[in-house]
Amino acid sequence: MTTDNKLISANEFLFGKPVRLMKLVTSSILLVIVLFLIFELHAYLPPSSYPVPTIPCDYFVLAGILFYTIVIHIKPWRLLRYPRMNNIAFISGLTWEMRQKAATVYTKRKLFESLIFIAVFYTIRYGMILYVDRTQDLISLIIPEIPSVLAFYLLYLSADKLVGYIPCSKGEYMLSNERGTHGSGILRKGNWRLRLAIILSMAVPKILRTMALRLILYIIRCDLFGFAFINCMAVIICGVIVFLLPSSVGILVRVVLLAAPIVIFGEIRETLFAALQKTIDIPYWFFTPKTLIHTCMFIVSILVIPYIGLFTVWQLRAGDGLFSQNSLAFLLSLAAVAGTVSNMYVISAISRKDQSGVFFAIAGSLLLCSMIPVAKVVFPVLVIIGNLGRFLQNNTHYVIQDSKRVG
Amino acid sequence: MKFELSDLTYTYKKTDVHALVDVNLQLDTNTITGLVGANGSGKSTLIKILLRQIVHYAGSYTIDSTNVNDYTGSIPGNYKIGYAPEDVILDDALSGYEMLHIIKEVRSISDQDFIDELDQLCDELRVEDWLKNQTCGEYSQGMRRKTAILCAMIGPLNYIILDEPNNGLDPLAMYGLKQAILRRKQSGTGVLVSTHILDIVDKISENVVMMRKGHIIYDGTVDALKSKWSDSATLEEIYFEMYAQADRNDLK
């Protein structure tokens, strides 16, 4: 097998087959129509009879694509920095260079998909503008969009450079060709990780501190840079969006501030799940299921705090007051997402694949419901009740399991 | 602390094989007990029952007169039992030192005691910098075994159960392990060592439990066993002879 063929099969094995162009265009058209239905048509409905969209779809798409580019980088990041989370037997057969190439191909493929989406989005958008407004001044409409599209195209062109910046470190240096230059022991001397984990675990109550220490240590060991980078970047991007958006688009701010933790939890849930699974397997310590869930909830709640802060700032800036129905809906939705992400980690009969599906289905529904007046309060409450019920069920399940194993 | 097993029988449901048959056994703290037997004689099953990994057995099992089946908490956690399984389970993402630090928190060991005890155990087992500098996923088989033994033995414990602790250990570490076990015994901790190396039992154990096909064929002190046979016979020879005798009885 030639190197190129090897690379193609490695890519297909790790990331799946590339989507056909026709399918890509069709799904983009469908997605754009759904987005327009949600945002543009919603804006045209009474009482705002004046046909000017109050929700800038451009901002939403650009914010969405910014998040998407971060999410795109998570997979190659994992492949390069923590290959054990992928198929270790397969990856150990690939050199560091091959893994880097596979990651670049994947990143480029995903950025290409988003470029197709942007093209479809703007085609439909300007088509609608031409059809509805009969404007002749199309050029002045297009010019402001050019810098953002160019910036995205540059991102696409420099995808391989971006992947090149991902360092090979951690304990996985044995799988790379860079032995000696990275991870050769310089960073791992001393106990800075332990000290950092001890300091961070101080944020949780004493009763949960040991479990928190264990989870934080696991996260630090798995991918400290990725974890910190994704969390900090998301908060910064959300902060920029909150400060840049006009005060008339509260609904968009709520969606963005809800979408960000969902994306982040989607990323860290697998690491946390792996940490919890391993915690239960190890026979030298014992943590009750309540401790496991409560610690997870605390860590998740801590990660959620910046978004509550940003939302509060937004509310104060928009003059909506802190205790509005929107605030209640936002906080309930955040609690529902946090509850779902914590609850998924209870070791139960559900397979890991199903857990992802359930989490994203609930998170997506919460996101959609956050735009519907009554549902934005009722649905999160239902999710919270469902989580409580599931927690009690899992608790019983765990006690039965515990009787068959070393605690 | 006292473990008491009375008329305990356990049968594998799938194969209907009797793993343990009418086992009567008492284990106390402050004694070192060797658990010996051929492969498949029921040693690991017995350990799993002691730790409540297996619950569906006939007969009774109590710890300090408390029926274990009625107890809902964690047996190793609440009764302060350290356990090193035969198949070493470590968290491959953490270093051994980080794992030990979590155990320190779980077992509420003070900083000074932790440092002192870890230093001593590391000296005995010949543990080096790798404990701090490498993750468990990078350890060799011997390093993993040593880390598992450290995890099982550190802290104030009432009882320590070591399942085949000698697997993968070098002779120096084996010697250190014996010293560590004797030291723990002096501080009042009971130790159960399941092993195929009869030399360990001969050198450090006061009691020995010999198992064959799920039955206990001998449970008593090593000295009493030796006195039944010729004085010059080693434990290995006695064990071999007892096994052969039992095989002959089976044939009859």
Image (cartoon, helix red, strand yellow):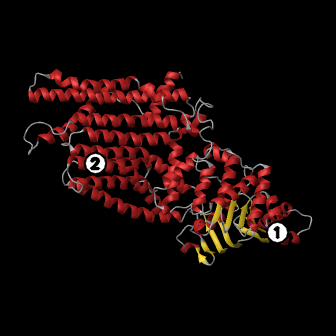
Q: In which quarter of the image is residue B252?
A: bottom right
Chain at numbered mark 2: A
Mark 1 secondary-structure assignment? helix
In front of the other: label 2 or label 1?
2
Residue B42 in view: no
Callout 2: few (<14), some (14-19), or many (20+) C-alpha neighbours within 10 Å?
some
Q: Is residue A7 above or below residue A55?
A: above
The residue singled out by tag 1 in the image is B222
Q: Residue at x 41, y 29 (%)?
A: A107
Give me the chain letter of mark 1. Answer: B
Amino acid type of the residue tagged 1 in the rendering: Val
Q: Where is residue A38 in the image (x, y as percent from the top left)?
A: 19, 41
The residue indicated by pointer 2 is A313
Quick check: do tags 2 and 1 share a chain?
A: no
Q: Is residue B82 visible?
A: yes
Q: In the depicted view, which residue is nearer to us: A242 or A182?
A: A242
Alpha carbons under labels 2 and 1: distance apart: 76 Å
All told, the count of numbered labels is: 2
Q: Is mark 2 on a helix, strand or loop?
A: helix
Instruction: Classify the position of the C terminus of chain A by image quarter.
Output: bottom right
Q: Residues within 10 Å of mark 1 (few under 14, many from 20)?
A: many
Residue B203 percent across, percent down from the top left: 83, 62
Q: Is residue A318 left or right of residue A237?
A: left
In the rendered view, would you say A239 is above or below A336?
above
Q: Position of residue A84 (x, y in %)?
A: 53, 40
